[in-house]
Image (cartoon, helix red, strand yellow):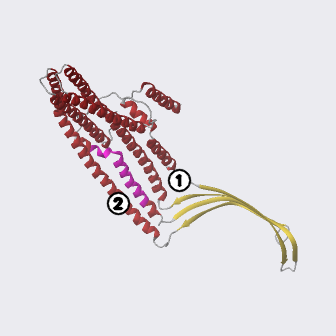
Amino acid sequence: MKQAVIFIVLFSTAFFIKAQGVLKLPDAVNISLKNSLDLQLSKNTIEADSIFNNYGVAGGLPLVTANLSDNEQVSNINQKLNTGTQIQRNGASTNALVVGVTGSILLYNGNRVVATKSRLVQLEKQSRLQLNSRIQNVMADVMTGYYDIVRQQSYMRTIDRSIDIAQQKLSIVQIRQSVGLANNADLFQAQSDLNALLQAKQSQQVIVDQAKTELLRQLTLKADSTIAIEDTIIVDKSINLDVILNSLNKNADILAAADQVKINEFIVKETAALRYPSIRATTGFNFSRNQAAAGQVLLNQNYGPSVGISIGIPIYNGSVYRRQQQVAELNVKNAAIAKDILIRDYSAQVVKSYQSYASALKQLQTEEQNYDISLKLLDVVFKRFQAKIATIVDLKNAQQSFEESGYRLVNLNYAAKAAEIELKRLANVLSL
């Protein structure tokens, strides 16, 4: 039933994208989480670790074995007994049948079973943390890619606005030239400016299309699917550096690194247990039957239960176990160092991302004013150009100021949003 529901959701989402061509951020994230091949690998790893997390794998459950052997043999017999009897026969057949069931259970081996089971528990927990980390990474990648498309489309709108002005400028110059009020230089300049903007729009369209193709790859959808994104970049301005730094202890990668230290500690215990005695209780039931056509003993049959205890004491094996334990202890230290390195790197990454975030927010306030001013300036200069007060060069400069301000504004918005996404990912709090 659950699989059917998932199939319906996936089918409906895919149909929606194909039919409507509109994709919202929550839909994109949900599709990526359902289709991600990386997440499927992580889920398979969790399932494998869950299967291995068993006392039987750790060696704590009884072992039961059954054996059966039936051997038929033909041989020549020549025997002389101390009673003076002589037995001689060619081609005599003999049969040996052995059937048995044995069981054994480990009583003590230096608590190696306990350490192994604890390690298996920790491995399963670590794999779940790694899945959580990949989920955060997938969400961050999709959100960043989604807002990159929003950024590129926003800049496309700026170009479209400038193209509209350039077309009107060209029309005005053509009208003026037709009545002898403009020269060819103004006409050529106006046409050249329009052509340059049209080429810029084509180049920008390629960038938008490639960004959409990359997003489709992240969603594990067909690369030639048609989607449209209509959205704006809204930045969360309430992020605090100290809160993010204090939340690093929730980061799944750091928690997984801490689990690796514990896993290596259990390996030390497992290795140390190899130097302790091993005690195993055994029991069983055996049936043996030997039958011969000739010879001193024609039939020998016995059966019955058995019980016993076996003890293995390691005395000397070239100090292999001791050296293995020393290496395992070094691996614990290495895992702890790797965790410290991860904390160091993530802390630095948080600070750098916050610096980008804070700088972008600070610049945004000024750039929003610049964008409004450049837009008003463009309108004023265009009206002056219509009134033959401003030159074509003045209008071109106003257009360039408008385009550059629009480019800076959308890039700052995107930079702030990308830094916000990265900070929340590192703090393991990224959500829709």
Instruction: Give whichever of 31, 425 is nearer the camera.
Output: 31
Amino acid residing under circle 1: Val
Instruction: Give whichever of 88, 353 is nearer the camera.
Output: 353
Q: Position of residue 316 (x, y in %)?
A: 49, 73
Q: Position of residue 127 (x, y in %)?
A: 43, 47
Q: Does residue 368 show up? A: no
Q: Is residue 254 magenta?
A: yes
In the rendered structure, the answer to whether residue 223 lies left or right of residue 246 reads right
Looking at the figure, which quarter contains the C terminus? Answer: top left
Query: Which of pointers 1 and 2 lies earlier in the amino acid sequence?
Result: 1
In the rendered structure, the answer to whether residue 72 lies left or right of residue 57 reads right
Q: Does residue 398 show up? A: yes
Q: Position of residue 93 (x, y in %)?
A: 83, 67
SS at badge 2:
helix
Name the residue rendered at 41%, 33% in the picture: 30
Res 299 → quadrant: bottom right
Name the residue rendered at 37%, 59% in the picture: 332
Instruction: Give whichever of 18, 27 is nearer the camera.
Output: 18
Q: Position of residue 102 (x, y in %)?
A: 64, 58
Is 306 rendered above or below residue 228? below
Q: Is residue 391 magenta?
A: no
Q: Which residue is labeled 1 in the image? A: 57
Name the residue rendered at 45%, 48% in the picture: 124
The nearer-to-camera label among 1 and 2 is: 2
Q: Which residue is labeled 2 in the image? A: 333
In the image, the segment drawn in magenta is 246-268
Amino acid residing under circle 2: Lys
